[in-house]
Amino acid sequence: MAYQTLVLHLLVSAPCDVPAEDLAVVRKAISQWNLNVGKIFGLTVLPVSWSEHAVAEFGERPQAILNDQIVEESDMAIALFYDRLGTPTGEAESGTAEEIDVLEQKGKAVGVLVNVSPRPPLSGAALAERQRLDSYIDELRKRALIFEYGEASGLMGHVNSFLSRAASKFQQNVEQSKQEDIQQASNSIEKDPDPSEGVWPRAEVREEIKTDGKGRTRRERKWTLVLENTSHGPVSDVDFTFEKIEEGALFRVLHHDGPISSMSPGGKVNFPLLLGWGSPKSVECVVTWTDIKGVRRTTHATVRT
């Protein structure tokens, strides 16, 4: 069954020694989460990584290019470690470390997971690299909650928990943003009204071609007075009058039987205008209405014919 969903990009970051099996488990966990949980949140998580989504490019240091192409556009990340920290980038101790920093600085969710499954003792350069990773992880623990896993089921459980937590926080942020927008709109209503908003009058004309019984044609103009509500809220009790019309001048609004009870935002109401030779080329129109706060307001405008 089809359903609406919002797509979030999850960066999967890992040094080159992380087993391919671990990366496959992460993708499987994401797929299962999308199917079982994501539709409840209305979210779909798509994994991205430099090995699959980066493109060749010149101009900057490699990690800066990756940051621009995929890291900064990601909504969250999972970082995996095995025995290696990775190659220094010039800005951070490794590519994965820099990616963690970039997303952390942007306030995005990052889950760090370390593989602690049994394996043969290390020595030489490999041991030195592992010690370098341990030092980095120890430093990272001062500002992050890091989890370890020793088997596929543990990794899958951590990924599921991370996705659910990140999705919940994302929804909270969305709701908070909505509430802030509502509050901002409320505050704007409480301020002095925008003079450009209101019920504005104008005249519109439509030409029709009429044919008489002898086949002769003539053009006939039909004029309309249009009132349009340009404010962001509904208005009520809308009425209008005209000023400075000379006595005897032909300028008459038809079907105007009293105030308009209400008009929606962007709404229009049309009245036929009866004009003829000698009708004024312009008149002053005064429109009065009650805004959403119950305040009686007035618009003055020149209606040109």
Image (cartoon, grey):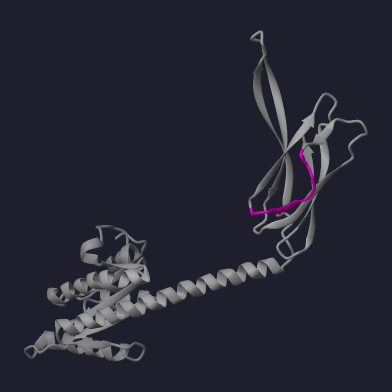
Answer whether residue 259 is magenta in the image. Answer: yes
**37 with respect to 121 (left or right):** right
Whether residue 240 appears in this view of the structure is yes
State the residue at coordinates (80%, 60%): 296
**112 with respect to 223 (left or right):** left
**262 with respect to 123 (left or right):** right
In terms of depth relative to the viewer, which is nearer, 175 or 99?
175
Percent of width and height locating residue 38: 31, 71
In terms of depth relative to the viewer, which is nearer, 207 or 92?
207
Q: Which residues are magenta?
A: 255-265
The quadrant of the rendering that contains the C terminus is top right
State the residue at coordinates (32%, 62%): 69
Relative to 154, is 200 above or below?
above
Percent of width and height locating residue 90: 30, 74
Relative to 217, is 192 above or below?
below
Answer whether residue 108 is magenta in the image. Answer: no
Relative to 255, is 161 above or below?
below
The quadrant of the rendering that contains the N terminus is bottom left
Does the magenta stretch mainly form a helix, a strand or a loop? loop
Whether residue 94 appears in this view of the structure is no
In terms of depth relative to the viewer, which is nearer, 28 or 266?
266
Outermost residue, left side: 120
Percent of width and height locating residue 107: 42, 77
Relative to 276, is 301 above or below?
below
Percent of width and height locating residue 123: 9, 89
State the residue at coordinates (66%, 18%): 210
Outermost residue, right side: 247
Locate residue 45: give its quadrant: bottom left
Locate residue 278: give its quadrant: top right
The count of marks equals 0
